[in-house]
Amino acid sequence: MGEWLADMADWTLFGTLTYDPERCRLVPGKRYGERSMPGLDVVRAHAFRWLRSGPVAVGRPVEAAVVGVERHKSGWPHMHALLKLPGGVHKGDLVGMGQSWYREHGYARLELPRQKDDVAAYVAKYVAKDIDRGDLIFFRCKDLVLARRREAAA
């Protein structure tokens, strides 16, 4: 599984996204001050919102991503992600994408993969870890897909 996902794209970033329980938004229906761990549907929505934040965070969209959701022993979710940014990584991309997650949810640790083997090992260890539970998110920027189809048709 690790090699298959590593071969899907020329991944430019990988990293871990965690929630800060003290800053996590309250879930509708809870009384003021009560905290609730986000369910998988909420985690997925947060991941997609973060991935769509690329144009604001780094000045261009995230082209593709694979995100594995996992739970800490406490039950709080965290994610391991592979991202592909068009044109590779530019100065400030790590900070921009990290801050985009931090503002609303918690902490992000993003890194540049040194080589393809790093990506395959990361995927095998983290992203595909809980694949048997189905907690794997695939993302592809629709705007880039449509633009490339238009270019190919022209």
Image: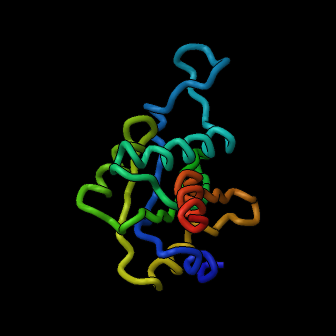
Front one among 30 and 149:
149
Would you place residue 18 above or below residue 117 in this image? above
Question: Where does the N terminus fall, quadrant-wise?
Answer: bottom right
Q: Position of residue 109 (x, y in %)?
A: 37, 57
Compare residues 29 and 154 and report the one nearer the observer.
Answer: 154
In the visual, does 91 lie left or right of 38? left
Tell me the quadrant of the picture where the C terminus can be found: bottom right
Write the residue at 25% across / 55% down: 92
Coloration mode: rainbow
Q: Is residue 124 visible?
A: no
The residue lying furthest to the top in this view is 32
Residue drawn at x 55%, y 54% as measured from the top left = 141
- Classify residue 115 as left or right of residue 128: left
Q: Residue 10: image x %, image y %?
A: 47, 75
Residue 42 left/right relative to 80: right
Q: Position of residue 91 (x, y in %)?
A: 23, 60
Residue 89 place in picture, x, y as percent: 33, 65
